[in-house]
């Protein structure tokens, strides 16, 4: 299974490539007054307004820096009713992928009440890398924002 690696603060995370629609440069964001602190604004993705969520803020590492290496990882997931949703995850060092084969040691399963979005972890280059579940990563208030926006549909 292929994973996209990214950083939020000092920690490297993995995201299943099957959840990734596209990785784009950090673009100009339109602020959303009253949005949760992790939502940096809206951007246009192929003519659709999509919320941009700072994963560094979500993980408690402070805002991601506005650098050339900072990217928006556009992710998609399906709600329980089958409706597809889109969000942009602002992250740094989105430059690598890793392919986990059946021959690799199995990932360790994790159940962290304070971080239910971390489903497992595996080793990449000697570093423990938590694996993120997109559908659990976005807090309820951010998911509600995506659910209510016309741009939340894929």
Image: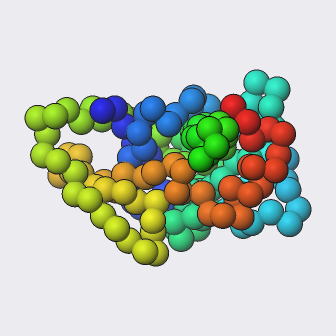
Q: Quadrant of residue 55?
A: bottom right
Relative image position of residue 130 (x, y in whole percent): 34, 56
Give x and y (percent) for residue 133: 45, 51
Q: Residue at x 57, y 64 (%)?
A: 58
| Between 54 and 114, the one nearer to me in the picture | 114
Q: What residue is drawn where x is 74% and y is 30%?
A: 45
In the rendering, at what x and y percent does residue 104 appear? 14, 39
Quadrant (top left/top right/bottom left/bottom right) for the C terminus = top right
Q: Which residue lies furthest to the bottom in this view?
A: 114
Residue 118 point in image, percent of width and height: 40, 60
Residue drawn where x is 51% and y is 66% of the image: 59
> Left or right: 90 with respect to 117?
right
Residue 25 in view, yes or no: no
147 up-or-down from 69: above or below: below
Q: In this view, does 64 lie to the left or right of 106?
A: right
Q: Is residue 131 at all visible to an observer of this figure?
A: yes
Q: Which residue sits at x=45%, y=32%?
A: 18
């Amino acid at each position: 299974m292929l994973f996209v690696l990214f950083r939020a603060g000092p920690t490297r995370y993995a995201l299943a490539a099957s959840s990734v629609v596209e990785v784009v440069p950090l673009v100009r964001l339109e602020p959303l007054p009253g949005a949760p602190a992790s939502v940096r604004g809206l951007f246009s993705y192929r003519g659709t307004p999509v919320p941009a969520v700072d994963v560094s803020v979500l993980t408690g590492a402070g805002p991601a820096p506005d650098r050339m290496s900072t990217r928006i990882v556009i992710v998609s997931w399906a709600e329980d009713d089958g409706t597809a949703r889109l969000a942009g995850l602002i992250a740094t060092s989105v430059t690598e992928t890793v392919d986990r084969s059946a021959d690799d040691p199995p990932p360790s399963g994790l159940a962290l009440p304070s971080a239910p979005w971390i489903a497992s972890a595996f080793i990449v280059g000697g570093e423990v890398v938590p694996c993120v579940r997109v559908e659990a990563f976005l807090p309820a208030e951010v998911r509600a924002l995506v659910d209510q926006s016309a741009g939340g549909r894929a």
